Amino acid sequence: MRNIFSEDHRAGTVFIIVGLALAAALAWQGTASPQFVLFSILQYFATVAPVALGLGLTMIAREFDLSVGSVMSLAGCIAASIGAADPVTGAVAGILGGLGIGLLQGLIITGLGLSSISVSLGVLMTAAGLAYIVTGNLTVSLDRPELSAAINAPILAIFSWRSLLAIACVAVSAVIFRWTRVGVDLVATGSDRAAARTAGVRTERIVVAVFTLSGGLAAASGVLLSYGLSVASPSGLTDVLVPAISAAIIGGVSLAGGRGSPMGIAFGTLILCLLNAGLNALGISPTAQQVILSAVLFAVAITAAPRFHRLLAR
Amino acid sequence: MSVASEISPSPVQSAKERRMTIPSPPTLAKLLAAALLVGLALSTPGFLSRPSLTALANAMSLVGCVALAMTFVTLGGNIMSFSLGATASVTGIIFMALLGHGFVVAALAAVFAGIVITALQGAIIGALRANPIIVSLAAYALLIGLTQIVVGPKMDAPNLDYQFLKGRIGGIPISFLVFAGAAVLAQLVVTFTRFGHELLLVGSNARAAEAAGIHVTRVTVLAYALAGALTAIGGILIASRFGSADMQTARGFEYTAIAAVLIGGTAIGGGRGSMIQTFIGMAAIAVINALALLQGFSMEFQRLTIGLAVLAVVILQGLGRRN
């Protein structure tokens, strides 16, 4: 969170204010019990946070993983196809698939010195194709109502297994980022790669690790989502990208690399979740919510642009 | 790990290597792929029949216009736009909504709307140097949401004024003639106008182009405006094909379009490529799809094949740059 209030992220503060205002509106409305509101906020958090975390970590390393959306749906499809017979194997297969795709992607990017946007664009389309093949272009349903009920059942009133796992992902990566050399190396890789390499940082290893993690986290989110919903479908490529990118940038990750932290990304996701919950409480239709969320991303894209502040200064 | 760091060159090294341009692996791969496609096409029974070729020409012209639009975006160094498929849908809906006022009015309005939608993004990207991927993703989501609120699920044609677009001249589908004509015109713009030269310069190095006195913002806005016009032409063709317009028919067109651009050999980083190459890339994709269909492969394999082809092209382009 250390960068969120820094000068070049004034946008972040604006969104915090908007988020808190909506939270106030939510409390004012008071139709649902506070526990339930917190629970539903955390459920949305569980879907977006791992994806935003993976994508955000690649952005800190000054790379960009476009493929998270399709890796998420591919892992969900794999898990749902296998998981009907054996949920554990399904989950493991889905997550391993995501890790494998991420590892391969990282190796291609660092091994050949390619731009990550172009490689992950190719991976996005390939993984989407794989998802269509796994499911045979159909929506796969998992006939295990007890499993999805267990995954989404409230624990301690506001948590569920799904949200606890997402929180655990964030916590583990935050600890690693904050208390080990990996965090420093990651930021160094993102801010000045040549200097970092001269200083002895194994930048290739960092980039490969970050992409592997990004694939694994997206896959985990996809597996849990499809288990929670009891269905998986191969479509929906870019739908998770919009909230994930918004969350990462609101949370203080810079597109220029070298800035941001797991806690910041989690915080950004939480603000988006609050916004979502506030809009829900105000009774705004899902379509209008989509418009508002994409307008948020538009605002994020504009305020994060390199020349935005020059425009204001004029 | 030491092995991996030996394989990957430092930026200084790769810049040095770039001077020696003998892109033999990509050229070889391209020739091989082309030979393979032609061989498969000739050996597949029914491929060269008239209905099959007509279907092929029809199939490639709809996405093809969007692919030409994408080429303007890619050439200018902005990689790709995620909003072109949604723009095609929206312009198709506008075309159908205004068809009651006559074909010309409806078509002009659709093209104008396409230009406004994309030129606005171009202005944000050009003037603020905003990230083109993120801006276009936001525009994609915004377009889909807004259209759902304003229009509803579907817009049917009020009359049959559009029907002539489904016809043929001398056995060739009109939509294909429109696509081919658009490709030639767009190529003329890139090759023979000052804007075209500036676009390639901005695409290869925006900072250097700016230092050389090129108005980067204006070039970017113009490139996006042209992309919008071409996308709208695609949208009109799509709406005419189906006799109605909604947000679903052109869904995902941006992926096929960028695939056509890359398979054609336009550099993903911008600055190098052409409309004719995109035309060839589009034809290759259409041939792959038609062959897969004739050989009895399902739709799903087409997606995977095209995804793998894009991945292969990206990797080969990187290898070619290094050699």
Image (cartoon, rainbow, N blue to C red):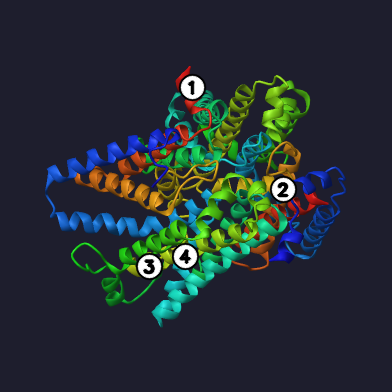
**Which residue is denoted by mark 3 in the rendering?**
A224
Q: Residue at x 61, y 60 (%)?
A: A106
Q: Is residue B128 above or below residue A257?
A: above
The amino acid type of the residue labelled 1 equals Leu
Q: Do labels 1 and 4 share a chain?
A: yes
Residue A225 is situated, as x and y percent measured from the top left of the image, at: 37, 64
3D distance between C-alphas at marks 3 and 4: 9 Å
- Of marks 4 and 2, the one in the foreground: 4
Residue neighbourhood size for the residue with mark 1, other residues' Cα within 10 Å, grouped as few (<14), some (14–19), many (≥20) = few
3D distance between C-alphas at marks 3 and 2: 39 Å
| Residue A311, numbered circle | 1
Badge 2 marks a residue whose secondary structure is helix
The amino acid type of the residue labelled 3 equals Leu
In-front residue for pair A118/A239: A118
Badge 1 marks a residue whose secondary structure is helix
3D distance between C-alphas at marks 2 and 1: 40 Å
| Residue A219, numbered circle | 4
Q: Choose top left, top right, bottom left or bottom right for residue B123.
A: top right
Residue A99 is situated, as x and y percent measured from the top left of the image, at: 53, 67
| Residue B281, numbered circle | 2
3D distance between C-alphas at marks 1 and 4: 40 Å
Quadrant into which the N terminus of chain B falls:
bottom right
- Of marks 1 and 3, the one in the foreground: 1
Badge 3 marks a residue whose secondary structure is helix
